[in-house]
Amino acid sequence: MNALELRKLNYTELQAKLDEAKEELFNLRFQLVTNQLDNTARLSEVKRDVARISTVMREQEIDAWQSQQQEEA
């Protein structure tokens, strides 16, 4: 999922996606340790997804904070 698609989601949907990605990352790491993982590149993909989701969530937090500051001024 790319950043443009993620920016269309609201904060709660992003939080759900982040939880799913972290759970998948946990499972992939577990499979890697037990030598059951076939596609090791998937680890990097999921790590990047977690980073993308976290970045978009932070962007939304900053936007909300800035709009709140402008309303107070």
Image: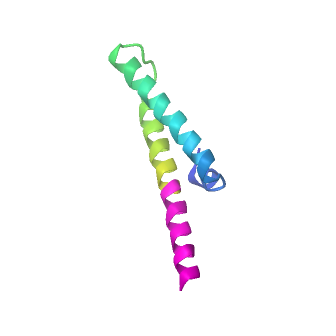
Farthest residue in the right direction? Answer: 8
Main secondary-structure element of the magenta-colored stretch:
helix
Front residue of this view, candidates 34 and 68: 68
Quarter containing the N terminus: top right
- Residue 13 in the image, given as x and y percentages of width and height: 62, 46
Q: How is the image coloured?
A: rainbow
Which residue is most to the bottom?
A: 73
Q: In the rendered image, which quarter is residue 40 located in?
A: top left
As for residue 50 lying within the magenta part, the answer is no
In x, y percent, where is residue 24?
A: 49, 29
Q: Is residue 24 left or right of residue 17?
A: left
Q: Residue at x 42, y 27 (%)?
A: 26
Q: What stretch is highlighted in magenta?
A: 57-73
What residue is at 61 percent from the left and 48 percent from the top?
A: 12
| Residue 18 picture location, percent across and down | 52, 41
- When asked about the image quadrant of residue 48, the answer is top left
In the displayed structure, does residue 40 sit left or right of residue 62? left
Q: Where is residue 5 in the image (x, y as percent from the top left)?
A: 64, 51
